[in-house]
Amino acid sequence: MLRKTVRTYHHAYRGLSRETWLLSFIMLINRSGTMVVPFMTLYLTRPEMGYTVGEAGIVFGFFGAGAFSGAWLGGKMTDRIGFYPVQLITLTGGGILFFLLGQMKAYPLICLFTFLLSFVNEAFRPANSTAIAFYSREENRTRSYAVNRLAINIGWAVGSALGGYLAGINYELLFWVDGFTNLGAALLLWILLRPASFQPANQKQNAIVTKPAYRDKDYMFFVAATVLFATCFFQLFTNLPVFFRKDLQLTEPVIGIIMAANGILIALFEMVIVYKLEGKRKNQFYFSIGVVLTGISFLVLNFPDAGVITCLVMILVVTIGEILALPFMNSYWISRTQAGNRGQYAAIYTMAWSVAQTLGPVGGAQVAQHWGFTTLWWMVGGLCLLSALAFRKCA
């Protein structure tokens, strides 16, 4: 039994390119400092800062607006100058902006630098997605994205757990650690990964061979459904920690451990699950089920007498949903691309998540503040089921 399990894990990870592993390692270093985002709402609503949940939601609205704009520019620049320089510039710029944001105390400056930080950070994503597609083959592309997500989630687990500990000492430490890991990732990218040969596509010739992403009607329908789902999914990182603290009276270290469980479970099981499922059925089948499970996970929070066990069950279910949804959503959009328009597709997909980063935290915070978290979780569960139905219609 043990030998069979080891063999399964070996097969799940083999066959990926060296560059894919290097990109994932760089991502691991970067995401090990993921502390500011999961604790930003708690940081802003603590007595020393004195902002309300609604005001914190508006800050995340600026975060989403910056992410939307940055994703558009990142995709455009990726098609124009290549994915390597875009990644290098955005990682460096993001590190510096983390340092600056941690020093801002006035609300307008917090909003401004949150916007700038997310603008630069999100410009990284289309370039990174394009790089993974470039260094992978069609038969292992889902696993290539999955190993990148593996790095993200191990980093998320480390960052959440360590962030909960550091937040108990001084919240400003989170900004310093996040900044230095960004700069460390940029340094590793520069040292370990050589720039790929890149030539901008001839626009006239490219227009004949490829079509703009926004003219792909099936893809744009998928993007609309993604916005709906991601609006719900982002509650996991923004309003959920506030619910844990305010309604369930959990401490920051306990919240950090609960949030870290998501990354740990993904690190342990996602690659094997993707390896077993990849190519067996259409991508749409898997991510539709994943979205349904995500909705159910939020409904679990409305169980009576919710406590730590309920929170862990919720994290388990949402993690299974995430494993089924996100890797196969990546494979779906990348399967519709060509070399000349991959940056466009990556940008629009990233922008969909960025729109959700605006709508989700702001809308969720307002619902929680005026009608309570119970109403919010019912709404999130219903919207997830609606988006799952929409995903089933994707061609």
Image: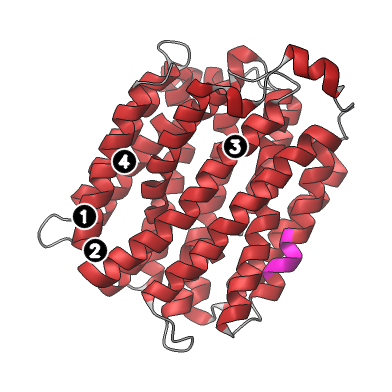
Helix, strand or loop at mark 2: helix
* Residue found 43% across the figure and 22% down from its top: 5
- Residue 25: image x %, image y %? 68, 41
Between the residue at mark 2 and the residue at mark 1, the CA separation in whole angstroms equals 9 Å
Q: Position of residue 6 (x, y in %)?
A: 48, 23
- Tell me the magenta residue range: 94-98
- Amino acid at the residue labelled 3: Ile
**Could you say where residue 313 lies in the image, as x and y percent from the top left?**
25, 48
Name the residue nearer the viewer: 187 or 352: 352
In the depicted structure, whether residue 171 falls above or below residue 241: below
| Tag in front: 4 or 3 | 3
The quarter of the image holding the N terminus is: top left
Does dot 3 land on a helix, a strand or a loop? helix
Mark 4 or 2, closer to the camera: 2
Q: Residues at badges 2 and 1 in contact (C-beta under 8 Å)?
A: yes
Residue density around tag 2, few if under 14, some if 14–19, many if 20 or more, within 10 Å: many
Question: Is the stretch drawn in magenta largely helix, strand or loop?
Answer: helix
| Nearer-N-terminus badge (2/3) | 3
Is residue 95 one of those drawn in magenta?
yes
Quarter-of-image position of residue 344: top right
Q: CA distance from mark 1 to mark 4?
A: 12 Å
Amino acid type at image mark 2: Phe
Say which residue label 2 marks. Answer: 373
Residue tagged 3: 348
**Of pointers 4 and 2, the one earlier in the residue sequence:** 4
Task: Identify residue for label 1.
Answer: 301
Q: Amino acid at mark 4?
A: Thr
- For marks 2 and 1, the one nearer the N-term is 1
